[in-house]
Amino acid sequence: MMTRRRILQDLALAVPLLAVWKTRALAEVARSALDRWAREVVDLNRALASGDISLLEWQERIATLNVSVPVGDISRYLQIDALSTQFRYPSRLAETVDPHFPEEVSVDGVTRPWFMRVFAMREGGAIIPHAHNNMVSAHLVVRGSFHARTYHRIEDEGQAIAIRPSLDRLLNPGEVITMSDDRDNVHWLVAQRSRSMTFDIGVVNVSKTRTYKTPANRYSMVYLDPTRKPEQDGLIHAPVISFDQSVSKFAS
Ligand SMILES: [Fe+2]
């Protein structure tokens, strides 16, 4: 017959065992959900690259996908805390590091033409305002917060690009903004807290039939100044500027 003392001993042993089992089970559930999320990201990028889905469809689906799993789980899965120890925050320009999906998810032929990148900034640091030629991307806030501004690209005018404001608000962890040639092509993010970070997924060389008057740099970027006053029709004629001009105005 079990003594009271024995029962208590067994119970004392059982509770931590149960806790371990629960933690492990949760971790495994999270892991398989994240593997599924990563595979869906890969499939989505591949579908866009092969022309099976539209730019707008990619924007809608990546935004839905990136809020379908907790942002903290995505950070842990991509080991963003460990990767971010290398950031030094020497200036107001963003620093970057490229995380990777586990090898079993990153099968042959999916590493390009898309990329993943973590952008980190100190308080007041910025992803300086820019347009993209023939590219899509989605920034998910993983830490801190950002003042985010986006603009539709209406027309290249030579020395300027006509843009229309489409978003101007604070973004917190777990929130996403996306851009493409079709919608919200210009973006500008300013960190509101120290060690603010976004996790960016982008696909390059998309919509190749679309040509622009304004050439992009090797990162498909065009720097511009969106701070001009809007005209009566709501358009801002944003001058195209150099990287150095942009840094001195938006990240110094
Ligand atoms: Fe960008």
Image (tube, rainbow, N blue to C red):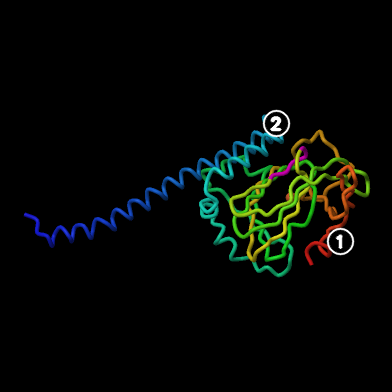
Q: Position of residue 83 (x, y in %)?
A: 58, 60
Label 2 secondary element = loop
Amino acid on which disc 1 is placed: Gln
Quadrant location, the C terminus: bottom right
Q: Main secondary structure of the magenta part?
A: loop
In the rendered structure, which disc, 2 or 1, sits on the residue that comes first in sequence?
Answer: 2
Specify the farthest residue to the right: 158
Q: Position of residue 241 (x, y in %)?
A: 88, 55
Label 1 secondary element = helix
Looking at the rendering, the stretch of residues picked out in magenta corresponds to: 178-182
Q: How many marks overall?
A: 2
Specify the farthest residue to the left: 1
- Kindly identify which numbered label has been placed on residue 51: 2
The stretch drawn in magenta includes residue 179: yes
Q: Nearer the viewer, residue 15 or 166?
A: 166
Specify the farthest residue to the top: 52
Specify the farthest residue to the front: 232
Determine which residue is flagged by label 1: 245
